[in-house]
Image (cartoon, rainbow, N blue to C red):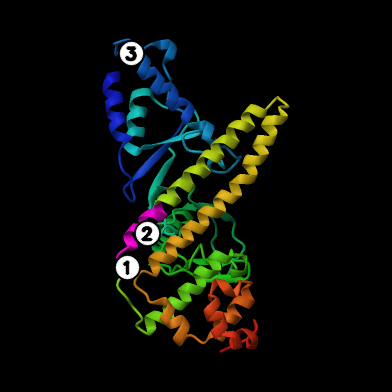
Amino acid sequence: TPLHQQKKIFDSLMKQKLVKDDIWCLVSCHWFEKWTKFIDIALKAGTDSCNKSSHPGPVTNFTLIKFINFQAPKLKKDLAENLDYKLIPEIGWDLLIQWYGISEKSMRLSRKVVKVQKHAIGKLMIEVYPVTVLVQLIFPESPDVDRIHYEVSRDDTVAFVIEKLRELLQVSAVNETRLWLQHLDKKVLLQETETMGDNRSLSSVEDNDDDTVNEKILSYNRANRAVAVLCNHQRTAPKTFDTQMSNLQAKITAKEEAILDAKKEIKKMKKELKGTSDSKLQKKLESKVKQLPKLEEQLKKLEIQATDKEENKEIALGTSKLNYLDPRISVSWCKKWGVPIEKVYNRTQREKFAWAIEMADETFVF
């Protein structure tokens, strides 16, 4: 394929919008940049012929892979998009292999487009790092069977995972098969209609005590909404809802970009510091490393805010909280989980329910 045609094809492919369940592939940024430079040099020279000195060679991505003895190769941790790897549509990967071949140890690194559940606005993303689960096949007569690592997508249904595990572990479909999620002393039976990213499965087995205050408030509001639905306290979505959500999504996107930029800067500074003792650069790196968790916490707060707002758009939450829910339940919950009462009740409401605040402690049961 002529070089000008390759460029035209890829310019179009890289503008492609994400579509749920589509497959994208990872290629080394180093190789991709060499290839684009090779194309640009040739086209500026007004020729489609190959310049051997700038030829990128076979497609490479083995620098992204961690090879472990007796285990399947894995993607290295903490890789950054546009710094370590480039994401290209699956058809783009196939075309590059057709045009340039593939280097030794490199392999197809396919990733699925999924809908991120924590973004209530329905954001699509490429799942670069799927969930890795440790699977153990349990037989009544021989419970100590070797464990295997298995990658699942957050969008995979439990039924799909069971089917794949049957094939992998050579379990007949005739046998009744169930998938249990074990977390410390908790065991959850997963329903086949669930996805592996559902709250009832992988994401909800963590202890509530480990959640941030904002995550605990989201849990409280969800329980409160359940009461509101039972009492039929519904409303139409406010006229300003779409605008508010759009503004919130813009803030989320900006924060995600800030986190990505911070990670790129950290990675770049770490590389620059190798073999040098630049104290100024070291201080700059330390400052950026300290800044990153704050940015991630701010992002989480915005995501929780978006989720809460989306779930609450057609529910009159105040009616159930103030008129139907015994305030001692809310007060006890706050004291039990270390949530400031002002996060649940404003000043006027705290004055109204002063009796409940004084009466109820963390052991109160309605």
User: Distance of mark 1 from mark 2, alpha carbons?
Assistant: 10 Å
Residue positioned 54% across, 62% down in the render:
137
Residue 168: x and y in percent read 46, 53
| Magenta span dominant secondary structure | helix
User: Distance of mark 1 from mark 3, alpha carbons?
Assistant: 55 Å
The residue type indicated by label 3 comes to: Lys
* Residue under label 1: 238
Left or right: where 111 falls relative to 137: left
Mark linked to residue 44: 3
Labels 1 & 2 near each other (Cβ < 8 A): yes
Q: Which circle's residue, 2 or 3, is located before the other in the chain?
A: 3
Residue 251: in sight, yes or no?
Answer: yes
Residue positioned 63% across, 27% down in the render:
272
Q: Which residues are magenta?
A: 239-249
Residue 132: in sight, yes or no?
Answer: no
The answer to which image quadrant residue 266 occupies is top right
